[in-house]
Amino acid sequence: MKVPALDTLWVYLSGSPLLSLLATLVAFALAVRINRLVGGTPWLHPVTLAIAILIGFLLLVDMDYPSYFEGAQFIHFLLGPATVALAIPLYDHRERVRRLLWPLVVACVAGIFTAVTSTLGIAILLGVSQETLMSLAPRSVTSPIAMGIAEQIGGIPSLAAGLVLLTGSIGCALGPGIFRLLGIRDPAVQGFTMGLAAHGFGTAHCFARLGAVAGAFSGLSMGLTGLLTAFLLPLITGLLGLG
Amino acid sequence: MPLVMGMSMLLACQMLGELVARGLSLPVPGPVLGMVILLVGLLVRGGVPDSLRLAGEGLLRYLTLLFVPAGVGLMVHGALIGEELLAIVPTLVGSTALTLAVTAWVLARMQRRFGVERHERGDQ
């Protein structure tokens, strides 16, 4: 009597968006707690940790990704308006952005070129498959743009999105050390660099850790990098004869 | 009511961006264009309405959380990533480190140089 009742309960729960929404929020809250417990180290980023916890949970209860996403899409949807909202800190710091416009554009082009050539170079040296290579190429732009580009040059869009997220967490982990090594303290430079190399993940990290100036520049570079990469990448892969 | 007003403004800009991106078949996602549209709007208006700031800064504070659902999608490609893990991880770590270093270095150099140029022009 008890077992079938539980069964139907589970069928109801796993079919409604409630469970995945709650699981996502609880996993995130838990991940933030754990991160704080270990002293806020960027090596155990709350987002990476939350993702790992959720994947573990889904495997444990045997729920597939599409059913999870049916509920979690309500959180995912807010990425759109949040991206639009990046205009607010950008507006607040408009004077600084205007003064730095040319340095920013030059740094952006240099950064994209480094990102693409080093990714392709190392990956080819290590002998990855063509499909993976083309999914890796757009890895330093924000996921929606990366998915479109990957499709265009012959990669797998959803794999590209995943690699973008991995890049983001790696960028957040490496960033502080590299800034220290190069002696860079300016939050504008740090923010812009994080936005370029670690896109939305880096931007979120900047808002959470480095403040509004870094966040504004990070958002700016994320948008600028996305725009420029969409045009530059097909050119670069074509030049290297990979397209 | 302010939260509703602010959220409506954000969604309206996103929708406009989405329409422009699709209408002109640009390779840029709608929200990024929406950000540009909102920025232009703020520059024209010359200020950020309180309601917009409330909604926008609330969302930005939780930006990290919003990436979680997409990230869980990595589980779909677990097998493929596992197969090429030894190539993918060094590639991502190596090129991300290089990208961070080059971008920060170029921007810091350019900023210094640009600052000096401005100063000289100011002296003349």
Image (cartoon, rainbow, N blue to C red):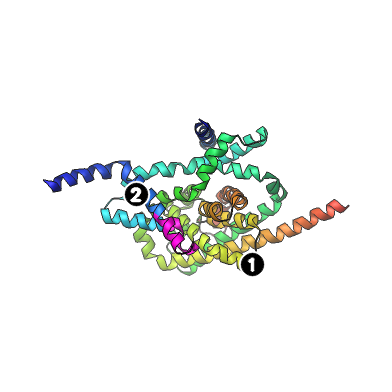
Disc on the earlier residue, 2 or 1: 2
Q: Which residue is mark 1?
A: A182
- In this rendering, position of residue A49 left or right of residue B1: left
A27 or B26: nearer the eye?
A27
Closer to the eye: label 2 or 1: 2
Q: Residues within 10 Å of mark 2 (few under 14, many from 20)?
A: some
Location of residue A19 in the rendering, given as x and y in whole percent from the top left corner: 31, 45
Chain identity of mark 1: A
Residue type for callout 2: Ala
Q: Which mark is residue B59?
A: none
The structure residue drawn at horizontal position 70% and vertical position 51%, both measured from the top left corner, is A100
Q: What subunit carries mark 2?
A: A
Q: Which residue is outermost to the right?
A: B124
Element on which disc 1 rests: helix
Which x, y percent locates residue A233?
Answer: 55, 53
Q: Find out whether the residues at labels 2 and 1 contact each other: C-beta distance under 8 Å.
A: no
Bounds of the magenta span? A30-48
Q: Quadrant of residue A84?
A: top right
**Quarter of the image where the N terminus of chain A is located:** top left
Residue ranking furthest to the front = A37
- Residue B41: name its quadrant: top right
Nearer to the camera, A2 or A127 = A2
**CA separation in Å, label 2 and label 1:** 40 Å
- The answer to whether residue A201 is magenta is no
Q: How many marks?
A: 2
Please say if A236 is above or below A10: below
Residue A118 at x, y percent in the picture: 55, 64
Q: Amino acid at mark 1?
A: Leu
- Residue under pointer 2: A23
Q: Quadrant of residue A160?
A: bottom left
